[in-house]
Image (tube, rainbow, N blue to C red):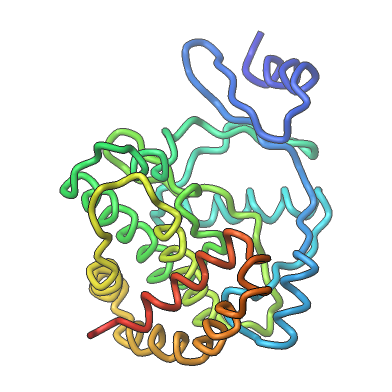
Amino acid sequence: MNLEEFTKKEALLNKSEIFDFNFEGKKYWLKRARATKPNKIQKFFYKIFSFELLIPSLEKSPEDALTFETAKIEKLKKIGINVPNIVYMNEDFFVLEDCGDSVNSYLRTKNITQDKFYYFIEKLLIELSKIHNCGQFHGGTQLRNFTYKDEKVFVIDFEESFDSNISLETLQFRDFLLFILSFIKIKEINFEIDYNYIINKYIEYSKKQDTMKKLQNFSKKVSFLLFLGEVSFIKKSLGSDVRNFFKLIKILNLLGK
């Protein structure tokens, strides 16, 4: 039985959208075609506030989503980005070679040292900057979408696409905002995260000298939300994502101080 035959058999036995399996001693991941739909609440608030983090993704059918993601993986691979190899694909799913564990799991290790923490951050920023320097965006730069294997960081999950009227510069800035926001969710470490270091390293690798100014302008634009967040009845109803967003605003307000 070859890999294609084995994969089709596994796809019949396992109904999960994404799952791993082993074939001839190697680990692979199968990802089914699945529709992408913008979050309705996010879409509603984007019409009011137009913040970069609220930009909704485009709706795509399962077939279109699969075609978009696999084409983007192949494109990024050709320009030197560390992405997993696609070893098989049909209209229902595609199969990737394993590219390690999520970097998020490494960074949330309770006893991780600062040196190891920033070792991963540097590798993450190098890969993200490579994407941006090649005139591309990711669309979902949360830490869970980066993996680590053989001393390399790989980038995964490229389902997101956006309205053609949204500029590349805006989408790249959105990438970096999502990236920073992911660090706020890390609670397990016993030291403070140096956000100035992360931002300055990104500027160094991406050559985007206006990033700090754009982050400061973003924080000024959304700071009024902090006041609303302190209203008692609103504060009680805030979900974790909104509370983390408020923490991001506070961090950005302190940049350069």
Q: Is residue 66 above or below residue 197?
A: above
Instruction: Name the foreground residue: 107 vs 110.
Output: 110
Instruction: Name the foreground residue: 203 vs 87.
Output: 203
Tell me: 54 left or right of 156: right
Q: Is residue 74 above or below residue 200?
A: above
Q: How many marks?
A: 0
Residue shown at 77% from the left, 46% from the top: 34
Q: Is residue 228 above or below residue 197?
A: below
Across and down, in percent, residue 96 comes to 56, 34
Specify the farthest residue to the right. Answer: 61
Residue shown at 57% from the left, 38% from the top: 86
Q: Quadrant of the N terminus?
A: top right
* Residue 228 falls in image quadrant: bottom right
Across and down, in percent, residue 162 comes to 68, 71
Tell me: 24 left or right of 88: left
Across and down, in percent, residue 170 comes to 53, 81
Instruction: Name the foreground residue: 17 vs 177.
Output: 177
Residue shown at 73% from the left, 29% from the top: 16
Residue shown at 72% from the left, 51% from the top: 67
